[in-house]
C-alpha cells in the first residue's frame, strides 16, 4: 500500500519537470524560427530562457541544446545559416566539426565509424 503512495508522489514531482522540458522544446523551435527570419537577439533570448528553465528544475540539457546551440553566444546552430559543418575522418572514428559563424566557437563531436 505504501508503494502506491510513493509512486503517486514521484509522478506529481515529475510533472513540473516534464512541463519544463516541453517548454524548452517550444522555446528552441521559436529560436530556430527567429534565426531563420534573421532576428538573432530574440533567438538568443529564447535559448537563454530555456537554459534558465533547465537550471531551475535541475534537468539535463536535451540533445538538441547540447549539439545545436552555440555554447559561447547561445544562438541555434543551423547548417548553412549560422554554422558551417565539416567532417574529419580518422582510422577509428569520424569527427563532426561545427563552427559558429556569429562568434567563431568550434564544437567537435566524435562519432564511431
Image: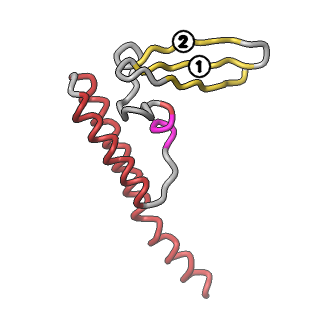
> Residue 1 colored magenta?
no
CA gap, disc 1 and disc 2: 6 Å
- The vertical placement of 8 against 96, above or below, is below
Of label 1 and label 2, which has the lower sequence position?
2
Q: Quadrant for residue 90, please give it.
A: top right
- The vertical placement of 15 against 53, above or below, is below
- The vertical placement of 87 against 50, above or below, is above
For the record, the magenta segment spans: 62-66
Q: Quadrant for residue 1, please give it.
A: bottom right
Q: Do the residues labelled 1 and 2 touch (CB within 8 Å)?
A: yes
Q: Position of residue 26 (x, y in %)?
A: 32, 43
Q: Which mark is residue 96?
A: 1
Q: Dot 2 lies on which element?
A: strand
Residue at the (50%, 15%) spot, across then down: 85
Q: Determine the residue located farthest toward the right in the rendered image.
A: 91
Q: Where is residue 78 in the image (x, y as percent from the top left)?
A: 39, 22
Mark 2: few, some, or many residues within 10 Å (few <14, many ≥20)?
few
Depth order, front residue of 112/56? 56
Residue at the (50%, 77%) spot, across then down: 9
Per the image, the residue denoted by label 2 is: 86
Dominant SS type (magenta): helix
In the displayed structure image, the side of residue 66 where residue 25 appears, left or right: left
Amino acid at each position: 500500500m505504501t508503494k502506491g503512495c510513493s509512486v503517486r508522489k514521484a509522478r506529481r514531482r515529475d510533472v513540473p519537470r516534464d512541463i519544463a522540458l516541453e517548454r524548452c522544446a517550444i522555446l528552441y523551435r521559436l529560436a530556430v524560427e527567429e534565426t531563420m527570419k534573421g532576428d538573432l537577439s530574440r533567438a538568443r533570448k529564447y535559448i537563454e530562457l530555456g537554459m534558465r528553465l533547465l537550471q531551475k528544475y535541475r534537468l539535463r540539457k536535451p540533445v538538441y541544446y547540447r549539439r545545436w546551440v552555440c555554447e559561447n553566444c547561445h544562438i541555434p546552430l543551423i547548417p548553412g545559416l549560422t554554422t558551417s559543418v565539416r567532417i574529419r575522418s580518422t582510422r577509428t572514428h569520424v569527427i563532426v566539426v561545427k563552427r559558429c559563424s556569429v562568434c567563431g566557437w568550434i564544437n567537435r563531436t566524435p562519432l564511431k565509424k
